[in-house]
Image (cartoon, rainbow, N blue to C red):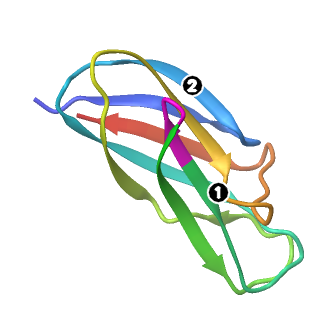
Amino acid sequence: MPLDQVVIDQNGPLPITKEFEGKSTAQAMLFVSGTTFTPNLAYCFSGVEVFLDNVSVGKVELYTSQSGYRHMALPARMLPVTVGLGKHAITLKPLDMNTLTDKYDYFQVVVCY
């Protein structure tokens, strides 16, 4: 029986860290979505790096050719992880110094067992 566990469901800014209780020892997927913006630069990457228990498990990134402070939806991404039972923490951090977030950005991370 599938089990989904919403861990992060909130506005920014980044970084965001949330703790949760692992519900299974089976392979799981993290479903990650969010929005970011970039400084007044065209042609740069913007995105989020995802950490499980302080270990990077992947990135959600977007290459933008638009300049200006426009909030953009990142492509939703599924990241394979092994969670295990017990306490864990998920952290979202800006991909780099070109990634900006504020209270108008929104992030969601769901653990799918």
Give the magenta-colored segment's residue range. Answer: 50-54
Residue 27 vs 39, above or below: the answer is above
Kindly identify the amino acid type of the residue bearing the numbered disc 2.
Lys
The foreground one among 24 and 76 is: 24
In terms of sequence position, does the residue under pointer 2 or pointer 1 come before the other? 2
Q: What is the magenta segment's predominant secondary structure?
A: strand
The foreground one among 34 and 83 is: 83
At x 40%, y 37%, the residue is: 110
The foreground one among 27 and 1 is: 27
Query: Which residue carries the number 1 mark?
Result: 35
Cα gap from disc 2 to disc 1, whole angstroms: 18 Å
At x 31%, y 29%, the residue is: 83
Q: Secondary structure at mark 2?
A: strand
Residue 53 part of the magenta segment: yes
Residue 39 vs 56, above or below: the answer is below
Residue 108 vs 67, above or below: the answer is above
Residues under numbered marks 2 and 1 in contact, where contact means CB atoms less than 8 Å apart:
no
Q: Is residue 97 left or right of residue 82?
A: right
Residue 65 part of the magenta segment: no
Q: Secondary structure at mark 1?
A: strand
Q: Nearer the viewer, mark 2 or mark 1?
A: 2
Image quadrant of residue 112? Answer: top left
Kindly identify the amino acid type of the residue bearing the numbered disc 1.
Thr
Residue 62 spot, x, y in % from top left: 59, 72
Query: Which residue carries the number 2 mark?
Result: 18
